[in-house]
Image (cartoon, rainbow, N blue to C red):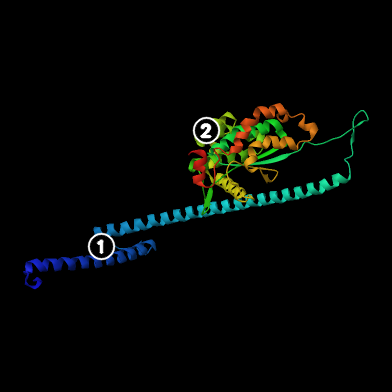
Amino acid sequence: SASSRPWSVQEPVKKLLEIREQRAKLKEAEGRLAAKVFDNAAGGLMSHYAAGSSEEHSFVSGFLQGAVQASKKSVEQQGEFAKQLESQSDIVTRLEGIVAELEDEMRKQNWKKTAEKVGEGEDKEQEAEPESDEEGGYQEKEAKPKFDIEFYMEAECPACKAFATRVIPAVLNAFDDMINLTAIPFGNAAVVNGTIHCQHGPDECLGNKIELCVMDLTPKWQDWFPVFKCIEKSHDSPLNASKKCLPTYGYDTENILGCARGDKGELLHLAAAKKTLSLQPPHKWTPWLVMDGKPLGDKAGSILGMICKKLPEHIHETVQACNPKYEEQNKETLAAFDSKRGYCYPDKALTQLMTGK
């Protein structure tokens, strides 16, 4: 039995357990005392400490030095934290500014649409007064119509690339300054706790922000679209494509990449997210085209023909792309996009089915 075991077996075990218990208590006491000494050192109470032995002097000096270093680190951390707060405050202020601008623009558009509707009613009641020409005759003056096209896309979606390199250029070449083009790179991304997660991964997010920074720097599509098309045409990553395309079209690569990787790129991406997620009705896939406030849905590939039908006759005749022969030659090419082949859907499984990726 346990009680019959010899002392030489039981007693060392008991002693060892007692030592371990005492060691734990001493360790706890050492910690409390060390914290007290450190507090005294940090508070300056030990600056005139009269040490006895050299060992004691070394011990106290070590605590004083540690307190100084800790104090410095604390100050540095507080300064860094203040900088972070200032940066975050600046980001929030700038984002609020972007949102305010978007809301103001929406108000302007609503006012414009209302004014146009009122104007349409007045036009039916009275004819426009003709202008006199140099020879004393009269001629009618009619401005070219304008078409607002919003191109909702994402940098790595196959069909978005096809639209950016074939459909959109055909429209721009045909109608030129009659088109007001806006590209919104966000697509089927998701915003989780203030962070954007792109459908095709971080490379796509960076690509979206690179394109947004280019458009922010040069807002007119006549300036930004050539480099935008170059990036979308590439089979390389958006980053590698940008390193080749940006300098080709006169952009400072480091400046654009700095924008894309910094706070401004993130703000622009969040603004694109707000614009995309505010769509009514919501987009069903990418690419998603909206013309004059109305979604084109699965007829987006036929946008060129749609615009031709909206043109006044005397302008229609001057646009080569509206010629029946041109339409017939390009019918199959453009109609292929109405099949939604390669389109990207918010539902990942459906996207894989349509793109094979």
- Residue at position x 70%, y 31% in the image: 174
Rounded to the nearest whole Å, what is the CA distance between mark 2 and mark 1?
Answer: 71 Å
Crowd tier of the residue under label 2, counting other residues whose Cα lies within 10 Å: few below 14, some 14–19, many 20 or above: some
Which residue type does callout 1 highlight?
A: Gly
10 Å crowding of disc 1: few (<14), some (14-19), many (20+): few
Amino acid carrying label 2: it is Ala
- Residue highlighted by disc 1: 52
Which residue is tagged 2?
241
Q: Is residue 133 left or right of residue 25?
A: right
Q: Residue at x 72, y 31 (%)?
A: 322
Q: Residue furthest right?
A: 136
Residue in the image at 74% along x and 29% along y: 319
Q: Nearer the viewer, residue 318 or 20?
A: 318
> Which label's residue is closer to the chain start, 2 or 1?
1
Q: Residue at x 51, y 39 (%)?
A: 355
Callout in the foreground (2, 1): 2
Question: In the displayed structure, would residue 94 be above or below residue 206?
Answer: below
Q: Which mark is residue 189?
A: none
Provide the secondary structure element on which disc 1 rests. loop
* Residue 78 image offset from top left, x and y in percent: 47, 56
Q: Is residue 255 visible?
A: no
**Image coordinates for residue 47, horizontal then vertical, percent:** 36, 61
Q: Using the rendered view, name the quadrant where residue 159 is placed.
A: top right
Horizontally, residue 149 falls left or right of residue 51, namely right
Q: Where residue 314 sits in the image (x, y, percent)?
A: 80, 32
Q: How far across and how far down the image is residue 60, in percent?
A: 30, 60
CB-based contact (under 8 Å), mark 2 and mark 1: no
Q: Quadrant of the N terminus?
A: bottom left
Going by the image, does 97 lie left or right of 68?
right
Q: Is residue 3 visible?
A: yes
Height in image: 230 above or below 287?
Answer: above
